[in-house]
Image: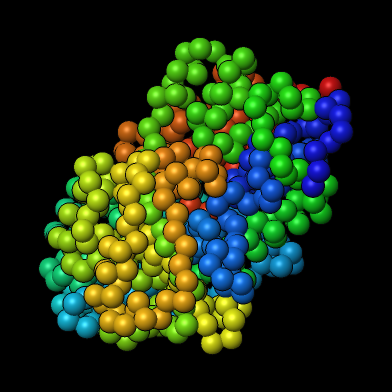
Amino acid sequence: MRKPETQQQRYDAVIVGSGPNGLAAAIRLAQEGWSTLVIEAAATPGGGTRTAELTLPGFHHDICSAVHPMGVASPFFKSLPLAEHGLGWVHPEIPLAHPFDDGHAAAMYRDIDATCETLGSDAQRYRRLYRPLVDDADGLFKQLLGPIRLPAAPLAMTRFGINALLPATWLARTRFRGDAARALFAGHAAHSIMPLDAACTSAIGLMLSLAGHAVGWPVAKGGSAALSQALVSHLTSLGGEVVCDWPVASIDELPAARAYLFDTSPGALARIAADRLPATYLRRLLRFRHGPGLFKVDWALDSPIPWTAAAARRAGTVHVGGGIDEIVAAEDLACSGRGHPERPFVLLSQPTLCDPSRAPQGKHTAWGYCHVPSGSDFDMTARIEAQIERFAPGFKDCIAARATMNCSDYEGYNSNLVGGDITGGMNHWSQLFTRPVARSNPYTTPERDIYICSSSSPPGGGVHGMCGYWAAEAALRHAPAAR
C-alpha cells in the first residue's frame, strides 16, 4: 500500500477514496477485468468503517459506522465472498430496544410477532404495515438501494412508497395509537437526521425497520474495520491495488486512466477536478446541501449498562429518547440548526453484548451519539450521559474511560463528513434521488471519464456499497474505450 514511484503507469480505473463505496466500485470494475487503483488519503483504508482503541488498550471502538443492517441487505455485498476474506456478521439477541420512563421498552426483534408483543394495542397495526414489506424484502432492497428506475415489482414499491413519502410524525400518529409503537417508529425515522415533520422522513424509518425484520441489525465481528479489510482483500485477489497516505489535491497528479471515480464529497470533487469540469457543473456541485452533524461519545465500561428495561439489556442498539413528542422536539431543534436539546435523542450501541472480542474479558464497550447543528463544537457529553442515566441508573459508575468526537473532529477524521454530516448530504426530498446534481445518470459528470461514487450519490448514506456499484456500472457503459 505505497504510493507508486511513477505516475506513468496506466490503469483502467482510478478510484479516489477507500470507503465502502470506493472499494465496491473498484471490485465491480475488477470483476470485469479492469485494472484498478484505489487511493486513500488516510493511513488505512475504510472511510467510515474503521476501528481503533479510542479509550483504553484492548477496547476496540468503531469510529464512525458500527451497526450494519444495510451491509447485510446490500445486493452487491451479498454477492461477494466476503466471509472467505475474514468478515463475520454477529447478531445481538434483540436488534433494537426503545426504553421508557416506566421501566418497559418497545423492542424490534427479527420476528415481527415477537416485536408486536411489546407494542400492546398496536400489535395488529404494526403487523399489517410490515408483514407485506418483509415478504417483499429482497425485491425492495434491490429497488431502493439504487437510482430511480422502473420498478421490477410495482405493487411492492407502491406499498412502500405511499407510506415512505409521508412525514414520520404523520405516519406514526395516524398509523399507531399507543406511544410505544409511535416512539419506536420515530426513533427509526430519526436516522434521517431531519426534522420529523418533513416530507419523506418515513422512508428511512420504514427502510431500517424492514431491514431489522428481514436481515437484522448486526455488527462486524471484531469491529467495522473487518468489513473494509475483507473488501480490500477481495479486491487485491482480483488484481486491484490500494495505496494509502496519498491526499489528492488535483486530478492532474493521478495516473492515466480510462475512468476516475470519486468516493468524495461533491465539494472535494469540484476542488480536485476543477480544471476538467465545466463551470456550470462545478457551481451545481458547490450548491449541494449537507446535513446536520453529530456529537459522539465512546465508552470503555467495567460492566454492562444497567438498563431498567430488560429488553435494553439484551439489545445491540438502544434508542434513548422517551416518547415521540420528546424525540420530535429534540430532532427539530438540532436538525433545524436552532440549538442543542437538553434531552437529546441518543442512538446507542453496545456491541460487546454479542461480540466480546472487542474488549478485555468481563469488560464492555459502548457508544452513543446525538444530532447537532452542522459544524457545532458544543460538548454534549453531560446531556448524553444524563439521558442514558435516566433509563439506566448507575450507568455513570460503569464508565472506565470515554472519548468524544464533535463535528470538527469528524470532518478532520474523514473530509467527506462535511460539518459532521455522516450521511453524505441532507436527506431532504429534493435531493434524495438527484444527488449530487439532477442528471439522467447521477453518477456521471459532463466529462465521460469522471464519476462520483460516494454517499452523495444515490441511494445515499449507509454502509451498503451500492453507490459505488452503480457508479461502476455507469463507468462500464460510458467510459472511453481502452487504448
| Residue at x-position 67% and y-position 31% | 248
Q: Is residue 388 left or right of residue 324?
A: right
Q: Is residue 106 left or right of residue 211?
A: left
167 or 308, which is in the foreground? 308
Coloration of the structure image: rainbow
* Rendered-image quadrant of the C terminus: top right
Would residue 84 be visible to someone looking at this image? yes
252 or 245, which is in the foreground? 245
Give coordinates of residue 73: x percent, y percent.
Answer: 52, 60
| Residue at x-position 17% and y-position 54% | 329
Above-or-below relation of 359 to 9: below
Give coordinates of residue 320: x percent, y percent.
Answer: 29, 68
Give coordinates of residue 315: x percent, y percent.
Answer: 40, 78
135 or 234, which is in the foreground? 234
Count up the numbered dots: 0
Residue ranking furthest to the top = 279
Would residue 166 be visible to someone looking at this image? no
Give coordinates of residue 412: x percent, y percent.
Answer: 52, 43
434 or 408, which is in the foreground? 408
| Residue at x-position 32% and y-position 39% | 428
Q: Is residue 107 left or right of residue 422?
A: left
Above-or-below relation of 285 to 219: above
| Residue at x-position 50% and y-position 30% | 266
